Image (spheres, rainbow, N blue to C red):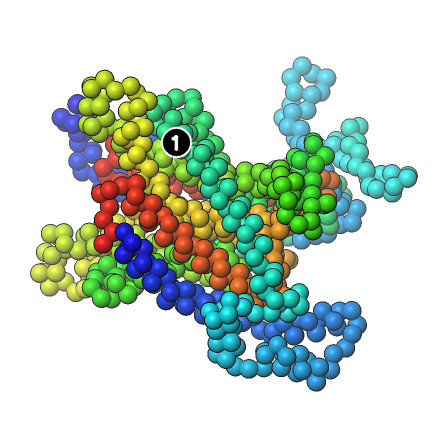
Amino acid sequence: MLLFIARRLLWMIPSLAVISVLAFVLIRLPPGDFVTNYIATLAASNEVVDQNTAAELRARFGLDQPMIVQYWKWISGIVFRGDFGFSFEWQQPVGDLIWERMGLTLLLTFSTLLVTWAIALPIGVYSAVKKYSFGDYFATFFSFLGLAIPSFLLALVLMYVAAMYFGQDVGGLFSEQYLTAPWSLAKVWDLMSHIWIAVVILAVSGTASLIRIMRANMLDELGKPYVTTARAKGLSEFRLLVKYPVRLALNPFISTIAWLLPNLVSGSIIVAIVLNLPTAGPLLLQSLMSQDMYLAGAFVLLICALTLVGTLISDVLLALADPRIRLE
Amino acid sequence: MSDTALAAPPARFVVASQWLLMWWAFRRHKLAMAGLIVTAALYIIAAVPGFFAVNDPAKQNARTAFHPPQAIHFLEWTDSALPSLRPYIHPYVLKRDPVSLASIYAEDRGRKIYLSLFAEGYEYSVFGLFTTRTHLFASQDARQPLFPFGADRLGRCVFSRIMQGAQISLTVGLIGVFLSLLIGVVIGGISGYYGGRLDFALQRVVEFVLALPTIPIWLAMAAALPHDWPAALNYFCITLILSLTGWAQLARVVRGRFLSLRTEEFVTAARLDGASEARVIFRHMLPSFASHIIASMTLAIPAMILAETSLSFLGLGLQPPTISWGVLLREAQNIRSIATAPWLFAPGVAVVIAVIALNFLGDGLRDAADPYNK
C-alpha cells in the first residue's frame, strides 16, 4: 500500500512538470502581455505612455526575456523557494494573494463533497430498494433536472429568489463587518451562515449524478444470490442491505471522487464568479483577463495539482473499501 | 422476458437487422421517444431560426426596453356562445412615471391585435442560399410588435433571440462532439488495435488529459483568443477548445472496445482472409461498436452545450453580436436587471430543455444499443 502511494506520488512529478509548462504556455499565449494591457488601460483614461517607459516596465517585470528563461525563473522560484512570483496587477507577491482564497476554495469543495454524499447515498439506496415507487420516480426526476441545470443558472435563480422574496443579499462569504477582520469564532460562524447557499448550489449536479450511479450499482447487486442467501438466513432487511450490497455498491461510488473533486473545483469557479465569493474563481478570471500571468499561472497549477491529489485519494480509498482490488 | 417470447420469437425478429432491432427497442422507451421529438424540434429551429422568430433579433429599440412578455390569447370570446379560434394580443402602452421618470408598461385591454400564421415579417436568409420574409406567425399590425418572451435592456425581442441562439448553441455541441470523436477514434483505435508500448504511451496521454480540470483550462484557452477575431473563426476556436478536452473519454471507450474485439474469431478470420488492416478496422470492427459510440456521443453533446453556455456567460466564449444562449444569459448577470426583467432567464430554460431532451435521447440510445438489455 505504502509502496503504491509512493509510486503514485513519484508519477505526479512528471505530470506536474507537464502541467506547469502547459499552464505557462497557455497564459503566455494571448498576443501582447501585461504591459500592453496596462498601457491600453492608461490610454483609456487619456494618459500616454511613451515607448521608453513601456520598455522599462517590461525589463522590470522580466517580460523582455525569451519565454524559456521566463518559465525557468518562475518554476525554479516555486520549486526552490516556494515563491510564486509577483502579481503585476496587485503589486503584491502572488503567495500573499492566493493562500486564503485557495483555502476557502478547498473548504467549499470539501463541504460540498460531504453534503453530496450525505444526500446521494441514502436516496440512491432508497431509490434502488423501492424501485418504481413514487419516491424513486421523484428522485429520478430530480436527478435529471439537477444534471441539466447549469450551476451558474441555479445560482442566479437562487440570488433572484433571495433578493425578491427574502430581501437578502446572498453574494459573498462574509458579512461586511467581518470582511477584513482577523479570524475569530464569530467570523467562522458568519462564514458558515453564508457558505451553505454556495454548497447547496454546487451539490445539486454532483448529487444528481451520484444518485443515478448508486441506484444502478445497487440494482446490479440486489439481484445476486448472496442477497437471497442472507435473507434466507433471517437477517433483518436493514442489516442485510448495509452489510453486503451497499458495501459492494460503494466501490464505483468511491471511484467517482476522482472526477467529482475536479468537477467541484471547476464548477465552484463559475458559481464563485456569479456569487462573488472570495475563492479562487473570480481572481483567476480577472487575472486571465488582464494577463496577470504569474497569478493566473499559480491558480491553474494549484487547481491541477488538487485534481491529481483527488485522483490519488480516490484510488487509495477504493483499495481500502474493496479488498479484491490489488494495487500492484 | 416471458417464456413464450423465448420459445418462439416472431419471424420478423429473426430476420431484422441490428439497426431495426435497436429501433424497436428504442421505441419502447417512452422518455427517450419524447427526447427524440424535442431534440428534432430544436434542431429544426436551429436550421431555420428566422422562420420561427417574430422580430429581427438584432434590432434595437429604445421605446421597447424591458418590454414585458405578452400573453397570446388563442380563443376570442364574442357575443355568440362559442369562442372562435383567432389568436390576438393586447398592445402595451409606454408611460413615464412622473416622479422617477421610470418607464411603465400598461396593457391596453381595449385594443386587440390579431396574429396570423405564415405572415410576412423582416427579411432573413435560409442556409445563406436565399432570403424570404415568411414567418411562422407575426402580428398583423407591423407597428405593434409582438414580444412573446418580452424584450431586453436594448429593446430586442428575447423570443427571437432565443430562436436565433439555438443555431449556435446547438451546433457547437454537434461540431464539438464530432471533432472529439475524430480525435478519440483515431487515438483510441491506434491504442487498442496495436497495443503494446504505443498503447502504454497513448494511455498516459489520455490519463493526463482526463486529469486536467476542464474549466480552468478552458478559461485560459478562451482568454487567449483575441477579441477582435471574426465571429466565425471565434466560433470554430471555441468548439475546438471544447473538444480538446472531450476526446479523451471517447478514446478510452474506443480503446476498450478494440481491445475486446481484437481477439474475437471474426476478426482473426478476416485477417487470415488477407483483408487489409484498414478493411479489418472499418468493415469488421467499427460496425460492431458503432451503436455504442453514437450513444456516448449523444450523451456528450449536452455537456458541450453547457460548457459553451458557461464560457459565453463569463464573457470568454462567443462575443456579442454573435447570438448564443450563453451570450443571452449574460444579460441576466446582475441582480438588478433580473429583478426588473425576470424573463431574461428564458434562454436558461431553453438550455435546460435542450440538455434534458438530449440526455433522455442518449440514455434511450444506450439502452437500445445494448443487446443484453431486456
User: Where does the image place residue B322, in percent across and percent down from the top left?
Assistant: 60, 57
* Picture layout, residue A32 above or below residue B159: below
Foreground residue among A63 and B66: A63
Give left or right: position of B35 versus B227. Answer: left
The answer to which quarter of the image holds residue A7 is: bottom left
* Picture layout, residue A243 above or below residue B118: above
The answer to which quarter of the image holds residue A282 is: bottom right
Q: Residue at horizontal 65%, vertical 25%?
A: B75
Name the image quarter holding the N terminus of chain B: top left
Q: Residue at horizontal 51%, vertical 49%?
A: A106
In the displayed image of the protein, which residue is found farthest to the front?
A184
Foreground residue among A21 and B251: A21
Give left or right: position of B92 versus B38. Answer: right
Chain holding disc 1? A
In the displayed image of the protein, which residue is found farthest to the bottom?
A52
The answer to which quarter of the image holds residue A293 is: bottom right
Name the image quarter holding the C terminus of chain B: top left
Reading the image, the residue beneath label 1 is A124
User: Where does the image place residue B219, in percent across and percent down from the top left?
Assistant: 53, 59
Q: Amino acid at mark 1?
A: Gly
User: Where does the image place residue A132, in percent across and percent down from the top left?
Assistant: 37, 24
Give left or right: position of A160 versus B241. Answer: right
- Label 1 Cα neighbours within 10 Å, binned few <14 / some 14-19 / many ≥20: many
In the displayed image of the protein, which residue is found farthest to the top?
B81
Give left or right: position of A53 versus A113. Answer: right
User: Where does the image place residue B175, in percent across and percent down from the top left?
Assistant: 44, 56
| Residue at disc 1, secondary structure | helix
Q: Is residue B50 visible?
A: no
Q: Is residue A122 visible?
A: yes
Foreground residue among B251 and A289: A289
* Picture layout, residue A311 above or below residue B367: below
Q: Residue at horizontal 70%, vertical 74%?
A: A39
